[in-house]
Amino acid sequence: LTRTARRLTLAAGAALALAAVLPVQAQDIKPRLIRFGYGLAENSNQGRAVKMFADEVQKLSGGKMRIRAIGGAALGPDTQMQQALIGGAQEMMVGSTATLVGIAKEMALWDTPFLVNNTREADALLDGPVGDKVRAKLEDKGMVGLVYWENGFRNLTNSKRPVTKLEDLNGIKLRVMQNNVFLDSFKQLGANAVPLPYSELFTALETNAVDGQENPYNTILSAKFYEVQKYLTITNHVYSPWIVTVSKKFWDGLSKDEKAVLQKAAVASRDFERKDTRAEAAKALADLKSRGMQVNELSPTEAARMRDKLTHVNAGVATQVGMDLWNETQAQLAKLRGG
Ligand code: TF8
């Protein structure tokens, strides 16, 4: 070997060894600061998963990409953060798919009452072709959807009375998300449905501006709604996903490697978040009872009456999301249920 050739071989060997030890250094990754906003408290399933995502991004990028997590709706309610992502003033967020219907109407699919029966069906639908199609609708609108996290099955709370039958909802001022399907659903049930951003919810309950709300056990616990809500009715009326999104403006400026870091970290955070949320949900009801909430289940007859009323909104959702998507969803669910 000539001297030059030997030197080149050595250099190549060194580069290979270096790549094996520190693969991240060889990648096209620049220092990046990513502001990641969310609505729930730091000490919530949402907050814990954002923290896990931040750690994962830091690890996968060799410390170059840094997530600045900003919780408690300090950057504004979901709808305001969405606009900041679209405009490029904020890089990332996680929030309810329900607040995205104004941007991508297909998101309303996830608001269908009783769409899925369990988390196995939810995961299969969200992580499969239907979930991918809905997620992709955000791209034209200035956002990139990375993964769905679990918010969970929603249950009803209020400060007025135990809801044991349909008629008990009459006249209850119920906060709903800013979403037409939720608004219609609770009107169907006879409640006085009031759309409000999540960031205003605790105060609205505390001041009796509204009597009730509906959210998964995890949130009723982490947001301390038990301090201002006496009655909890197990309704499981809809499964709510969260979606992790990136500003398209920001995303388009990232290298392939940088995008891969965010995608990998997002998938890891999704798996962590679902596990953590389910573990917490399994214990949360007992916790809520011990904090003084009065919990009731619905009799099969009353559950069926509510279900009947709620499914009146299905035709509207089908029209809103398009019959093709609706039929594909029903076909996948039938397949999942058929075994
Ligand atoms: C709601 C949702 C909230 C989410 C969260 C702020 O009731 O269930 O948990 O929007 O990201 O608004």
Image (tube, rainbow, N blue to C red):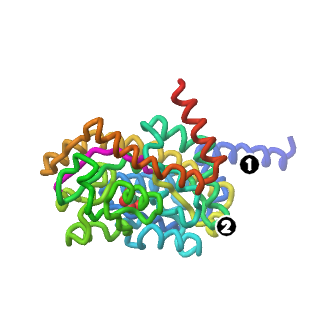
Tag 1's secondary structure?
Answer: helix
Q: Position of residue 212 (x, y in %)?
A: 26, 60
Instruction: Give the residue at the far top of this rendering.
Output: 339
Label count reads 2
Using residue 128 as the reference point, say whether residue 207 is left or right of it. Answer: left
Q: Quadrant of ligand 1?
A: bottom left
Q: Which residues are magenta?
A: 230-240
Residue 29 - label: none
Using residue 203 as the reference point, say whether residue 320 is left or right of it. Answer: right
Q: Amino acid at mark 1?
A: Ala
Instruction: Give the residue at the far right of this rendering.
Output: 2
Above or below, 85 relative to 266? below
Tag 2's secondary structure?
Answer: loop
**Mark 2 packing: few (<14 Cα in 10 Å), some, or many (20+)?**
few
Residue 253 - label: 2
The residue that disc 1 covers is 11
Magenta-drawn stretch contains 191: no
